[in-house]
Amino acid sequence: MVHGNIRMAYCASRFRTVRRPTVEVMVGAVGVGGKNPLRIQSMTTSATQDIAATVRQSIALAEVGCEIVRVTAPNVASAQCLRDIRAQFSAAGFAHIPLVADIHFLPSAAMEAVEHVEKVRINPGNYADKKKFSVREYTDADYDSELQRIHETFSPLVLRAKALGRSLRIGTNHGSLSDRIMNRYGDTPLGMVESALEFLRIARSHSFDQLILSMKSSNPKVMIQAYRLLVERMQQEDMHYPLHLGVTEAGDGEDGRIKSAIGIGSLLLDGLGDTVRVSLTEDSVYEIPVASAIVDKAMSLWRDDASAPTADSLDPFHFTRRETVALTLGGQFSVGPEQPPRVITRIGPAANAAGQLAALASPRLKDTPAEGLLVSLASAEELSLLPAPGAAFYALELAPAITVTGLRSRLAHLPAGTLLVRAFAADEVPALGAFAHFAEEHALVLAAEIAPAALVSIGDTLRGIDAAHLIFTLSSPTTSAGHTIGAYRQLAEALCSLGLQAPIWIRNTAATAVRGDHSFLSKLIEASFLTGALLCDGLGDLVSIETEADPVRATQLAYNVLQGAGARISKTEFVACPSCGRTLFDLQSTTQRIRAQTGHLKGVKIAIMGCIVNGPGEMADADFGYVGGAPGKINLYVGKLCVQYNIPQAEADAHLISLIKAHGKWVGSETLLA
């Protein structure tokens, strides 16, 4: 994981949010990038040739705050409809809201669409390129010949957009890479970036700079790495185009919101991103409040000062989990190498612990238990009020007045593996040593909260503590820019400089919150920003969501964030596209129906895609796929291989279940991803 002092060329600072400077791109009258605020966009789901329905959906999106509306144009006939859609949308009072045509396969559709709307989005993996999942070796001459063919096919769109004052988005999707890219670069973030750069260079050859880029994936880790790598590569070529951020096929409900907030939030807090879309398998209008909340939190952290440290020792382009020592909590919960991040739940004052422990015994949490129980103690005497923790361990947050002497008098209430949680100032070295020695002596573990800036000055004391009894955390990060992710990164960097491999506990508290209301959505986004972003960086061995007072909801949210970040899988993973005019069945009802039948399959990933565009490629790493093949017909996939064609939709659910059973995946068992 440590690669020396790598300069993070993809952002000005990993410790505060310094917005990346870009050229301004005009999407009609709406400026993107430059000094403009973050822009929010979404997409209609009606059939584009149903002009009235598409106009109604566009109006509904505009009325809830959507600033840019995208409409699919899968063929020339649909692209021709954009003329009337644009005219009627403008006549309804929304001439200021730009429309974007979404193109995948047909340059002819793009050439028609650019005549009518303010921006055209193309997918470089599908546009004038081949995707048949064939394997071949490309010589340099073969490769150059393919690039020349793409140049000849894409150039007319660039030149027409330039003549009309339109903008273009080069929208790369992880699962839609061409055979040529796949054979040379593989199914990787680098392949995604190279796919986009080929088209950028063609546009640059025509002196066209009204370009926006996206690097979407259903996997937040892949998406984050791809955007970072794209920016680094663009900077090497003096390209400074704005970025459109999104996690594609995020799904619905809480899971879809979490995945989106992890991917989009991680990048926004690095200063990357100029326009966003939250892709949910729900009515499009429900995407806008989520996007608005994400955008508001990110913009509140923007800083112009880039004087903060620019680098740390983590490689941001390749996921590697931070190496730690192994330790045990509660006698049964291993923390460290090859172990999943452990979930700690706050249960309130000691006097009320029994009632909250009963709530946490709910059958709803059978597969997602609270492994640690966080209790704040005002005095050592309160230890006697605590009931037995059951299968969990206690994490006892100690008030400053509690001393080692007081704890010694209550040893009977401190079973082995209990986690003692205490904050230490830089001048409390003797107290730190006393608590650490006490923890070692009685098989306890100390979770020390120490400001990263103070760690180096007390390094000798820390190195003298047995690492098997030490964890570090931050409940109230102190950063001048309010960048909590940056504070945890500084903590990890300080530990690295001291050669300490103690685990890190990520705590979501009122003090770590960015801003916003106290709604569950706000708490969900905060947890996704902090915990999700750090997990995608390879940091974090324990997590707690302390901003949610209900211990059951807090526990479920913690597991959902872990799953969204790919750090711990505790239920079925669903990859579902958000629907559009290409969709061949009702995605919302289908997703909910399949979830109801297969939601117990822990560690299984099922993709539900409305059409072939969002089919074998977009499913990327799904185990099984349910894909619209034709009206009323479903194709079933195992990985990227279609194994059953044109099944009547009424029979498709049963066929999917039989397929899962045939591959031995029907009985779920928890899969832990380090």
Image: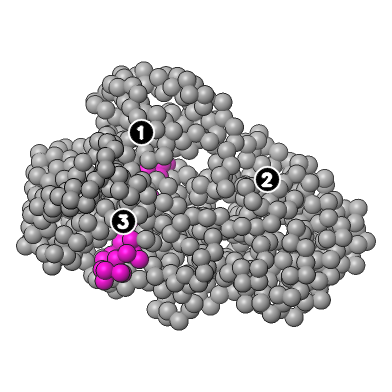
Q: Residue at x 25, y 58 (%)?
A: 197
Q: CA distance from mark 2 to mark 1?
A: 36 Å
Q: Position of residue 650 (x, y in %)?
A: 34, 19
Give residue 370's mark: 2
Q: Secondary structure at mark 2?
A: loop
Q: Is the residue under label 2 in contact with that under label 3 (CB below 8 Å)? A: no
Q: Residue at x 31, y 35 (%)?
A: 615
Q: Which quadrant: the N terminus?
A: bottom right
Query: Residue 244 sits in which quadrant?
Result: bottom left
Residue 438 lies left or right of residue 292; in this view the side is: right
Q: Secondary structure at mark 3?
A: helix
Give residue 193's mark: 3
Q: Residue at x 35, y 54 (%)?
A: 190
Residue type at numbered disc 3: Val
Q: Residue at x 83, y 60 (%)?
A: 440
Q: Secondary structure at mark 1?
A: loop
Give residue 640's mark: 1
Residue 73 drawn in magenta: no
Residue 365 lies left or right of residue 156; in this view the side is: right
Q: CA distance from mark 3 to mark 2?
A: 40 Å
**Residue 64 in the image: above or below residue 475:** above
